[in-house]
Structure formats: structure tokens, C-alpha cells
Image (cartoon, rainbow, N blue to C red):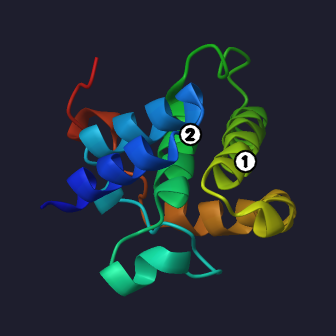
Amino acid sequence: MKDKDLIFELMRRINPRPLTKRVITLAYKSGYDAKSDGITLGGQFEFQGFKLKNPCGVGHDWLYFMGVKNPCINASGDRQITDYSARAWADNWFKIAMYDFGYWAFAFLYWVALRAFAARAWRMHRARNHPCPVDDLPDVR
């Protein structure tokens, strides 16, 4: 069984909200799990034993990446506003996804950490040319 098949089976069993399921499914189908680090500083929770990245972290990273590339969010052309809007969008989704996966005790704490400290982490990712250009990912429409 491949990693993404295990994640899809898990989602079938926990039955998350449709938006949570859709974002994680698209992130894995696009191959973004290879580019994501999952949840950066808090461990991968129960996925670490399987040597898998937490799907909430993979979905968050993919959603942020797609938000930065979204022409509606980037209508102003101001990169700082775009980054802030994309991060807020992805961070709010992440909090909901954490609740859906049963991490209710950590959801708010991780959301606060994302809002407070993730800007620096993403600047470091960008300095290393990460995430990859959108053309490198397969079309999942």
C-alpha cells in the first residue's frame, strides 16, 4: 500500500469535512507531499511511527502554495499582502483540519504558532526556492 493510499483510507474512516478531505486529496494527488515537511516543529503525531508526514501539514503547505499563486489573492500585486492573505487562508484551514483529525487539544495552539511564527519559516523556504514552481506539479483538475 502506498503512502497516499493509507492517507486516503484513513480519511475514509475518520470522515473529515468535505473541504478538509478535498484539500488533502488534491495535495497528495498533485505530488505535493514530496515537497512538504508536514508539521514542522511539533512532530507528525501518530504518523511518525509510519514514517509519514501528517496530512494536515501537507494540506496546509499545499494550500499556502496555491494561495500564493492564486490571481484573486494576488490582485493587488503586493507580495507581502499576498503572502499574508495566503498564510491566513491556509492557517485557518489547518485549524479546522486539526479538529477533523481529532487533535482538538492542539488545534488552537498550533494555529497560534502558525500565525505568530510561520512567516519566518516560509521566508526561509522561499530563500531556498521552495515551494517549487507550479509548473513542476501535475494538473489535478
Where residue 24 sits in the image (x, y, percent)? Answer: 44, 42
- Would residue 78 appear left or right of 113 to someone viewing this image? left
Residue lying furthest front: 13
Residue drawn at 34 percent across, 42 percent down: 133
Residue drawn at 39 percent across, 42 percent down: 12
Residue drawn at 68 percent across, 36 percent down: 86
The reply to whether residue 30 is visible in this rendering is no
Instruction: Give me the disc on residue 16.
Output: 2
Residue 135 falls in image quadrant: top left
Residue, disc 1: 91
Q: Residues within 10 Å of mark 2 (few under 14, many from 20)?
A: some
- Would residue 43 appear left or right of 58 to someone viewing this image? right
For residue 16, above or below residue 58: above
Where residue 71 sits in the image (x, y, percent)? Answer: 56, 16
Q: First in sequence: mark 1 or mark 2?
A: 2
Image quarter in which the C terminus is found: top left
Kindly identify the amino acid type of the residue bearing the numbered disc 1.
Answer: Asp
Residue 84 falls in image quadrant: top right
